[in-house]
Image: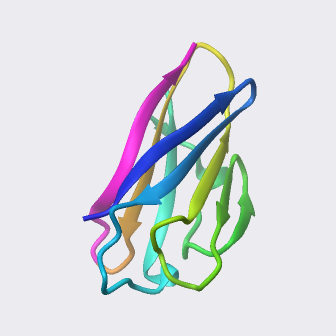
Amino acid sequence: MMFLSKLTSDPGTAAFEVTGAPENTLASRLFSVVLLINGTVDEASRMDPLEPGTVGNVTYIDYDGKLTKGDRFTVSVVPDTDYELAIIWRNSGDKSFGMSWSEQ
């Protein structure tokens, strides 16, 4: 099972790393990413399919074309705001994994 671990939360940016990835990893294009800000989907930040680069407030860093341990996400953030970064299976629309947090 995959997870996101928060690495840093510097002013203006939160960084996360994929951890716990299974041995049989899948192509990143089989996933999409949705960012929720205060419970509302940030459509400008939707990555569908998931590919390396920046879309809206989300940056995805990948080195092998697969969603694997060590891949990183950074999110542009502002104080006093709640966030959720959700990694979604494209074929079903179900949430695979993600993380919720608040910026103070």
Residue nearest the observer in this picture, 23 or 86: 23
Answer whether residue 49 is visible to the viewer in this image.
yes
Q: Is residue 5 left or right of residue 22?
A: right
Q: Position of residue 68 (x, y in %)?
A: 46, 73
User: What stretch of residues is rendered in magenta?
Assistant: 92-104
Q: Residue at x 46, y 59 (%)?
A: 18
- Above or below for 58 versus 91: above
Quarter of the image where the C terminus is located: top right
Residue 8 location, quadrant: top right
- Above or below for 8 versus 32: above
Q: Is residue 101 left or right of residue 42?
A: left
Q: Is residue 32 left or right of residue 12?
A: left
Residue 84 location, quadrant: top left
Q: Residue at x 37, y 83 (%)?
A: 25
Answer whether residue 46 is visible to the viewer in this image.
no
Quarter of the image where the N terminus is located: bottom left
Q: Position of residue 14 (x, y in %)?
A: 63, 37
Q: Residue at x 52, y 54 (%)?
A: 17
Residue 32, magenta (yes or no): no
Determine the main secondary structure of the stretch shown in magenta. Answer: strand
Residue nearest the observer in this picture, 88 or 99: 99
Q: Position of residue 26 (x, y in %)?
A: 39, 85
Q: Residue at x 74, y 60 (%)?
A: 54
Residue 98, magenta (yes or no): yes
- Above or below for 62 versus 41: below
